[in-house]
Image: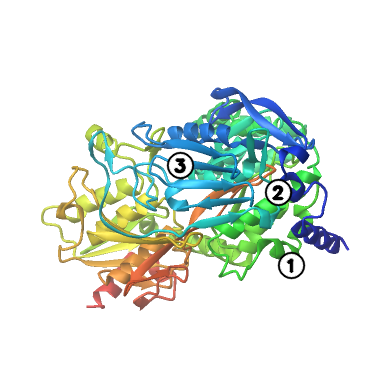
Amino acid sequence: MKKWIALFLCLLLTAGTVGVTAESLAVTAAAGPLITTKNFPVYALSVTDVWREDFPVYFVDGAEDLPFIDLADWKDFLIYAYDRIDSANGDKVFGLTMEVQEEERTVVLTRETGADAMFDFENRQIVFEDYVAFIQPANVGYMEITGIPEMRNNEPFLLQRTKDRNLYGEVTVVDLKEYDIPMIAQDGKYLLPLQTLSGFMLSHTFAGVYFNGESLFMNVIPEHTDPWNVLENNLSLNGLLTADVIAKYQAYEGTAEESLNYLLRIIGEASGKGKELIEQYRINQESSLYLKYRSAPKAARSEALIEYGINELALELDCFYGLKESHNIRDFRLFFLQNELGDGLIDPDAAKADQAVADLMQYWFDDSHSAFISSSYLSSQKNAEANPGFSTSAGQALYTELDDLRARYPNATLPYYEVGDTAYISFDEFVCDLDEAGVVDYYKLVAEGKMPSDTLGIISEAHRQIIRENSPIKNVVLDLSANNGGMNPAAYFTMAWFLGEANYSFQNTFTGAQTTHYFRADVNFDHQFDGNDTLAGRGLKLYCLISPGSFSCANLVACAFKESGKVTLLGRTSGGGSCVVGYNTTAWGTSYQYSSSNRLAFVKNGSYYDVEQGAEPDYMINDYSHYYDREALTEFIHGLY
């Protein structure tokens, strides 16, 4: 019965006949809605960093959990936000101007590049001349998403583009009227809901804007989470949550807070690493923007927030979910009615709405990129229940199987290992080391002898070993069999190391834009991009070991190797994962990640093909145990030629 109630409500929503609808809000000032305003502080990335103490927020017809922002204020907010994230060099080059045409009831925001967005309040539409050009950071190539600058300290830095091929996106119309989302032009103000502005114009930077009735918060979405989640993950990674520790914790009698403090004490007393992690956790607690956001009173969601929230979520996913077509989803509002998700999304209890978002990401999308991050401030639950889908569960089981097998062959987990004339390079994630400015200055670290043991560090050391004087190496094997992806720049660095000049391609499912970037990597960190940085052209035989666990960036690398014809793939078909991870929030403050509209692709005969289906090996190895017996695998490779 409840599902039919949800169906009836959502049908009414699309017809615009329930409660305070967007149709009734988007009217002239003469018969307009009741608008009130309050000023709030804006916290940016830290509990000690307040950008503004008096940022104006507007509310319509008494719904004080559904904030609206005037476009003039939003312009200032965007300039501040982009200035914070714009460049690792600290250059402030982002520009944004605003033009109001009162008679036409339109507002145009124009970037320093000339790209613009027109807000048509008469027809309730946002029109982007080129959405990709409007939202991208300054001083980067079109659809460039490496996340690092080409120049740093006035010298070439890590990756250098050699040429591009771009197909620019079409004019894109975001029809808010179709989704019953309000735009209000009244009393000289041009108001849109905060989530619509944030979701379409800021979330692509991984930043979200949150409101909790007391303050506004701009935070990095994947970091907008309880510090305990970070601690728990670190404790697991360092093997500190042992069976003995867990048993002591479960046997302890006390309140939840007392039990937690007891757990932290015994972990901190057990080892120096445990003490270090606990101390960092305490620091994170004190500085956590998420905990401050969550400290506001819990309450039921208003009817206005429920109606707007479900429609806004549908709109953003219809525009930005990159696997919508392959999931056979035509319209997310309809999709919410075809399963139990609609029940949760229309429930006043934010915990139930958050659980619906978690189930959507993890159970229904089931694409291994989509996931729940953190709860709304309105929810009484800190975390949603994890209900992984069938593919995700199978993937987790595979990684466990591969880990168990590698435990029998310790050499298989070494970053660099030689067997006679064959070198093996292994890492399970593409990682670049980061600092406050973004990717660290590797050139400075090299000069100081402090190269990190991340992907770039492993590759640079392996390169030095392979090309050393009198090197016996004739075969090089990159083991990506248990690599589940990671950071794009590290993957591109790896591709260029093997291929010399490499390339990657994207197609944007929202705008139709396409791009191919060719690039080289400075593997030896001498600020030069030449033959000294690559294994290509040295007479070496190059191999890549893959499995269904080779996912996301690992899958991209495998597909690039396959298409190049210069690297032989061994193992089983790689695991797919074609979309770059995107981050967003809901109107009631839930955080999640998803497969975005930027889909990785390769170009063949001038056409773009996405890499979702994975790369097939040139030589099949069915038994996973044969992957990690390096001596036996070396003999197998010798038999291939």
The residue indicated by pointer 3 is 110
Farthest left residue?
Answer: 470
Q: Residues within 10 Å of mark 3 (few under 14, many from 20)?
A: some
Q: Residue at x 69, y 33 (%)?
A: 58
Which of the labelled discs sits on residue 309, or is there none? 2
The residue indicated by pointer 1 is 338
Mark 2 or mark 3: whose residue is earlier in sequence:
3
Vertical arrangement, residue 526 with respect to residue 497, above or below:
above
Q: CA distance from mark 1 to mark 2?
A: 18 Å
Vertical arrangement, residue 529 with respect to residue 362, above or below:
above
Taking the image as drawn, is residue 53 in sight? yes
Mark 3 or mark 1: whose residue is earlier in sequence:
3
Q: Residues within 10 Å of mark 2 (few under 14, many from 20)?
A: many
Q: Residues within 10 Å of mark 1 (few under 14, many from 20)?
A: few
Foreground mark, 3 or 1? 3
Question: Left or right: where does residue 482 sit relative to residue 543?
Answer: right
Q: Residue at x 78, y 62 (%)?
A: 11
Q: Nearer the viewer, residue 161 or 457?
A: 161
Question: Left or right: where does residue 382 sit relative to residue 572?
Answer: right
Secondary element type, mark 3: strand
Farthest right residue?
Answer: 1
Secondary element type, mark 2: helix
Q: Residue at x 47, y 52 (%)?
A: 131
Secondary element type, mark 1: loop
Which kind of residue does numbered mark 1 sit on? Gln
Which kind of residue does numbered mark 2 sit on? Gly
Q: Which of the 4 image quadrants contains residue 189?
A: top right
Q: x, y percentage for residue 405?
A: 46, 63
Farthest front residue?
Answer: 103
Q: x, y percentage for residue 10?
A: 78, 59
